[in-house]
Amino acid sequence: MKNLKIPADFGEAEFTEKRSRFIGNAYYVTSEQEVSETLAALRKKYWDSRHIVHAFVLEDGTARFSDDGEPHGTAGKPVLSVIQGAEVVNCLITVVRYFGGTLLGTGGLVRAYGEAASAALADAGIVETIPIGVYQINCSYDQYQQLVRLIENEGGFDLNSEFLDTVTVEFTLPLCDEEKFTAALVTTFAARLSVQKTAEKMGKK
């Protein structure tokens, strides 16, 4: 697994160019199915718009765009260029256009769609993902509070605890911190507790 750049949140930006209204949105998506669902919702919301242009890039390298009726290469391609230029993946950017009655020309369209896409992505922000591990530790009730403090102090997050005869604590931790955490666990509990890694995934840095 390698570090990736993804949209940090939903982003939105709007501006007017020669009375044409452009509404840019940036989304975090993980599949073409999510892209299709998002576009379907937008077509309902902006049913009276002239164009809903989009482009997306997924983690697996899939990259597509649509001009949605604009002259070829003047709309979807500039939006895709914004995504690829920022080296962002799992990203969908849409630009809704309400035509204002004045033609923008090829250069004007490229600039307008590119500007709307850039502004939407800037509003969303970009975050880097890193490989993280999912871990479990079984402890006694007496050890629980001290263990939780240790996990939090060592950078663990997303804690989830199950209280039965013993306590099972599940948490995530950046893989790069695994060795340091294991050493701290041994020192703190005099090797009475052990940690088990149950999965690996990508998470926000």
Image: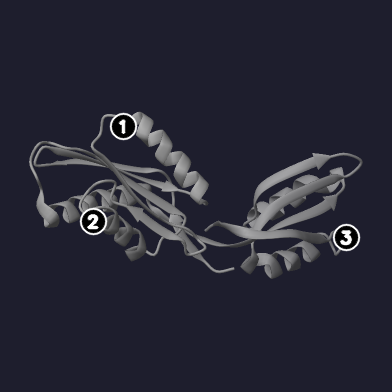
Going 80% across and 54% down the picture, which residue do you hit? 137
Label 2 crowd (10 A; few <14 / some 14-19 / many >=20):
few
Query: Compared to 158, does 78 lie above or below?
Result: below
Task: Residue 39 in the image: state x and y as whole percent.
Answer: 40, 40
Task: Residue 48 in the image: state x and y as whole percent.
Answer: 26, 29
Q: Earlier in the sequence, mark 1 or mark 2?
A: 1
- Looking at the rendered image, the quarter that the N terminus falls into is bottom right
Q: Which residue is mark 2?
A: 72
Q: Earlier in the sequence, mark 1 or mark 3?
A: 1
Query: Compared to 54, does 201 lie above or below?
Result: below
Q: Earlier in the sequence, mark 2 or mark 3?
A: 2
Nearer to me, 161 or 96: 96
Query: Disc 1 versus disc 3: distance between alpha carbons?
Result: 60 Å
Q: Amino acid at mark 1?
A: Tyr
Q: Is residue 173 left or right of residue 97?
A: right
Going 62% across and 57% down the picture, which residue do you hit? 155
Residue 123, numbered label: none
Mark 2 residue element: loop
Task: Residue 183 in the image: state x and y as whole percent.
Answer: 74, 68
Query: Compared to 68, does 181 lie above or below?
Result: below
Residue 187 quadrant: bottom right
Q: Which residue is mark 3?
A: 192
Q: Which residue is mark 1?
A: 46
Mark 1 residue element: loop
Q: Is residue 37 visible?
A: yes
Query: Disc 2 versus disc 3: distance between alpha carbons?
Result: 66 Å
Q: Amino acid at mark 2?
A: His
Nearer to me, 72 or 80: 72
* Residue with the most extreme right position: 165
Q: Is residue 154 visible?
A: no
